[in-house]
Image: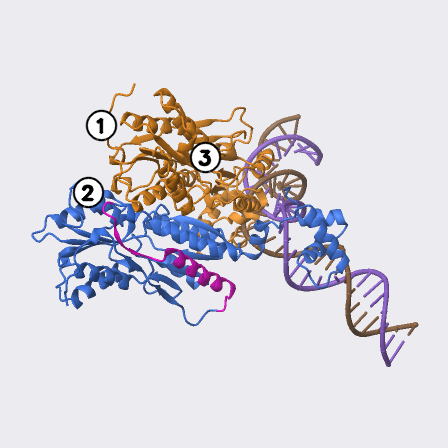
Chain colours: A blue, B orange, C brown, D purple
Amino acid sequence: METITIKDIARALNLSTSTVSRALRNSYEINTETKKLVLEYAEKMNYRPNPIALSLRDSKSKSIGVILPEIANNFFSQLINGIESIAYNMGYHVVIFQSHESYEREVANTNYLVSRKVDGLLVSLSSLTTDISHFEELLDKGMPIVFFDRVPKKVDTHKIVADNFGGSYQATEHLIKTGKRKIAHITSPIYLSITVERLAGYKKALEDFGIPFDESYVKYCHHGGMVVSENEAAVQELLDMDEVPDAIFTASDRITTGCLSVLHRKHIRIPDEIAIVGFTNIGVAELLNPPLTAVVQPAMDMGNQATELLIKLIEHPKKPTIFESRSLKTSLIIRESTAGKIVNVS
Amino acid sequence: METITIKDIARALNLSTSTVSRALRNSYEINTETKKLVLEYAEKMNYRPNPIALSLRDSKSKSIGVILPEIANNFFSQLINGIESIAYNMGYHVVIFQSHESYEREVANTNYLVSRKVDGLLVSLSSLTTDISHFEELLDKGMPIVFFDRVPKKVDTHKIVADNFGGSYQATEHLIKTGKRKIAHITSPIYLSITVERLAGYKKALEDFGIPFDESYVKYCHHGGMVVSENEAAVQELLDMDEVPDAIFTASDRITTGCLSVLHRKHIRIPDEIAIVGFTNIGVAELLNPPLTAVVQPAMDMGNQATELLIKLIEHPKKPTIFESRSLKTSLIIRESTAGKIVNVS
DNA sequence: TGGATCAATGGTAACGTTCCCGATAACGAT
DNA sequence: ATCGTTATCGGGAACGTTACCATTGATCCA
């Protein structure tokens, strides 16, 4: 448990540090017996190479940085588990930073992580990030970055996302097929990739079933639902409409629970007055009142795949000619919050 | 954005590295003009000291390690937010490791964090940790450690816990006052501090109200509710009893949701057949069916205080003669899962 | 037997920073 | 003129590790 160094071993065995170093790395040019001597002594003294010294020397750290909006969120914490399990197996460790949906903190975290010499970055953009030059500069300098979930559109690197379009389409289609026609959508800021894609899926489903798209049925929460008043306002605006929606499709963990909470307080009956389907990974969806129909993302798998791609990038510095943009299937879990007779709509 | 070093500045300004270093640290023995020159150039070139080099030199890293069971858990992720906000303000950064309730991973994480030269440790024990010698050794060597939530009994260092006894007493008392007499308790493994304290509060409340304690009403989940079958078995055993409980007091986030899920599947009516109160910080308690009465811990504040104590320990290496053991008040939020007439019981 | 080859090991610089110890010059005091 | 003082700066070592370039014997072949 004492911090013993190569120097200590060298002194104890009357060898040079070079010899010890090479013996430990099992170099071919070291005498077998010397090697054995060193290895045994190192084992006995519980020698562990100093990662800091290694980092300083090689400018790598066997660690990957994760920047995401927040961890107190089922989707992200499941995703982190996915990241960690792969990283752990590959000998990397994971440093997590939260942007708390703040652009400034995202930039600060990025800089810190870079100065800390992480070997690569796993990033999901904050809801207030419109300028991504801090990542582009790093990319230009050769820093491996993989984006997940909330990905920048133009940037040229690996990306892992859920099939937001498909999931959204499926949710909307499900609402339509259970007889809903006035379907609202409460979602994140429009400059997030997830917002655009989910909105597109929603629109396409409406279109396919001959329901005209009504812009006033779409509400954006600029802080991604982090601010209570936002949800409140969004829901209230919908309730104040001439044609009150008969269904709401909510686009994230926080927005979903926020809206549910508002609807509860207003004693709106779900699904009778308004049906709800959420794009959410909350673990207790089936315990909610009513049990919540949800589009669930394969969060763990997203974490796995993003990490695999990142480590591949780190360990094969030759630039891949093509970057992957994987889209993982979501699954629609139907529960009572959208209960209704299946109606023939097409 | 380029990684510029002190050497680069020295070369550019025709100074020595020592001078530059001292100028940057605003040493009194450097000429004001020289200082200005260096500072301006450093600013212009966006110089950032290399934390790795600092770590190697000083054997400190301005970082603190956190070891806890899992982050995909409302209580812990709220607590992490508390840790981060303080650490961030004090110029430390936070490295989080999950034990996933495994003793081996806890030990591995500890070793890694130590070799990584964290300046201190914030620890909540895994549910399978009975031997804490890996922490005791570190403590003996002077490593600052603060325990929170699940703390070892004997160890001599700062500890931050919720008032588990009080919270538990309050919950039990509430059940009794709403007319329940056959109150079961499903909890974590008995060798965890939280288990012992919560059990004690539960017992004391029973005793104070003249209800005999029945050991068979207490069920332990050895994996802290992480394993579904555990919850299932615990609940089933209770349902199979001659005197089926009329209330269950569950002792953690995971155990609470796990039990609720089982009760739902078995179509047990809450609170009519069985009332439920959970020791839990889940965010959507009010959205559950029925809304869940909960003992809520001041998770964020626990994180704050633990971090403050740790940093104090780090920055004032003189051993404090006495270690603090703070216990923060919980709050009982009453909702429908324990609805019932208030009865006169004493 | 001289030179070449090879196995085995040592010495040292380098990564970026700080700190201890000097070094230099200017200046006033003796 | 000599000395001590002060202000300002430079040189080098150290943190732990590895890579490159020696160095040393020993062996071998012509």
The amino acid beneath tag 3 is Phe
Kindly indicate whether the residues beneath marks 1 and 2 are on one polypeptide chain.
no
Q: Chain of mark 3?
A: B
Q: Residue D17's x, y, as percent?
A: 63, 53
Magenta span includes B323: no
Q: Residue A157's x, y, as percent?
A: 40, 65
The reply to whether callout 3 and callout 2 are in contact (CB within 8 Å) is no
Work out whether residue B319 or residue C11 is closer to the camera in this orientation and state it: B319
Q: Which mark is residue B341?
A: 1
Q: Which residues are magenta?
A: A289-318
Task: State the quadrant of the C terminus of chain A.
Answer: bottom left
The answer to whether B1 is drawn above or below residue A2 in the figure is below
The answer to whether B65 is drawn above or below residue B326 in the figure is below
Indicate which label's residue lies in the foreground, 3 or 1: 1
Decide if residue B2 is in sight here. Answer: no
Q: Few, some or many C-alpha atoms within 10 Å of disc 3 (few <14, some 14-19, many ≥20)?
A: many
Q: Chain of mark 1?
A: B
In what element is the residue under mark 2? Answer: helix
Cα separation between marks 1 and 2: 23 Å
Decide if residue B128 is in sight here. Answer: yes
Q: Residue C9's x, y, as percent?
A: 76, 57
Q: Residue at x 27, y 36 (%)?
A: B273
Q: Residue B240's x, y, as percent?
A: 37, 39
Q: Which mark is residue A264?
A: 2
Return the residue at label 3.
B148
The amino acid beneath tag 2 is His
Cα separation between marks 3 and 2: 35 Å
The amino acid beneath tag 1 is Lys
